[in-house]
Amino acid sequence: MKRTKIKRIGVLTSGGDCPGLNAVIRGVVRAAHEQGWETYGFSDGYEGLISPVRYRRLDPNGVDSIMPMGGTILGTVNRGRFAAKVGAGKKAEIPQAILCEARETFEGLGLGALVCIGGDGSLSTALQLQKAGVPVVGVPKTIDNDLSATNMTFGFDSAVEVVVDALDRLHTTARSHKRIMVVEVMGRHAGWIALHGGLGGGADVILIPEIPYRRDALIHLLKQRKSDGFGSTMIVVAEGAKERGKKLVTKEAKLRGQGEVRLGGIGEQLAEDLEATTGQEARFVTLGHLQRGGTPSALDRILATRFGVGAVRLIAAGHFGHMVTYLNDHVGGVSIAKAVRTLRTVPPGGETVASARSVGISFGD
Ligand code: F6P
């Protein structure tokens, strides 16, 4: 690693939490220490950079035991004065006064770089800070696994494990009662969690945003399964899935001025509709934030540590405005501007969907 004149760097976590954030922080602090740099951690995402400014020094011993911990020791915010994303592809400009105040805090503390760990909204904020004069590097974070520039983000594997564990438990009760079980999982614009969780947990139906489902196809399938002797049916539905020609099911009719609209409710709606139409008892479970909490899987700990070290490497090389990526088992970097541009959604004609279909899983299309 090339040494620079940096003495101190900052780190923050922004947006929704997910398993592995603390492992990234630990990776950053330890790799920075190797470079001879101190690390300051800001509280509550970008909010810690502005009044009332909140930060603390993170030393390598202090972060020793945080790797297995879920959440983030720094706290996070996904709606606030820095909310830079208001919907898929729609970005908001952060007021210059806020960006300037953040830069003044950064300069006043003698920081040489800021590591921003967050999803595409938080990375868009990082870019705006970079334009305002704060040298940033990004670490992509989303359990939805929907950033195109990286093959995988940490937190995804842990979330899929939660879904698979839930399906193992729900199969036994669904079979005992001969019920339809609808399991709603996270995934706003991309159905990766539903697809992988459904495949790993032996779902019969997987509904994802990329393949709008047909209600009549679902009903036909349920009737067919009944006459074929299948007592129960396990349906995994992503929160962002929708019926062909219908709108997304949301918790709020419209935005409350900040951040993205809250999704949720499709599982309940579907279970009620299917029970009323087929006469077979149906139940629903929304896994919600269970998928975001708890200890990270081994794979996520490893990826998160590599991402933390990768962020320090980007700083040492002077690659500001870049974020770490994981491609072909290599942690490298790409410009944030390029990375936040496109979502990585499930290809409906891809091999994973085809394999799912080959083992009899329906996508309701
Ligand atoms: O983008 C990640 C995600 O977990 C989505 O799947 C979900 O819709 C959203 O965050 C929920 O965020 P929160 O409840 O923290 O607002």
Image: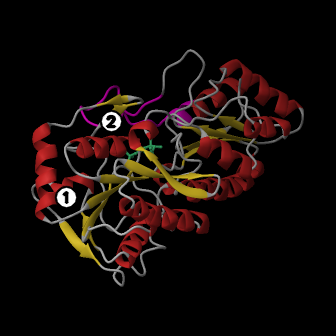
10 Å crowding of disc 2: few (<14), some (14-19), many (20+): many
Residue 176, image x and y in percent? 76, 52
Q: Secondary structure at mark 1?
A: helix
Q: Quadrant of residue 308?
A: bottom left
Q: Which residue is mark 1?
A: 48
Q: Is residue 324 visible?
A: yes
Q: Nearer the viewer, residue 262 or 112?
A: 112
| x and y percentages locating residue 14 in the rendered image | 33, 52
Asked whether 216 falls inside the magenta stretch, the response is: no
Is residue 272 or residue 22 the one in the foreground? Answer: 22
Does 145 sit above or below residue 108? above
* Residue found at the far top of this picture: 245
In the rendered structure, find residue 214 and report the number of the disc placed on it. Answer: none
Q: Which residues make up the magenta segment?
A: 249-269
Q: At x 41% / y 81%, what residue is drawn?
A: 64
Q: Quadrant of the N terminus?
A: bottom left
The chosen color scheme is secondary structure
Q: Which quadrant of the structure image shows residue 223?
A: top right
Q: Is residue 140 visible?
A: no
Report whether 260 appears left or right of 152: left
Q: Are marks 2 and 1 in contact (CB under 8 Å)?
A: no
Please tell me whether residue 266 belongs to the stretch shown in magenta. Answer: yes
Residue assigned mark 2: 85
State the separation of the CA atoms marked 2 and 1: 19 Å
Q: Is residue 264 left or right of residue 197?
A: left
User: In the figure, 30 relative to 47: above or below?
Assistant: below
Residue at 56% from the left image edge and 55% from the top image edge: 159
Identify the secondary structure beneath mark 2: strand
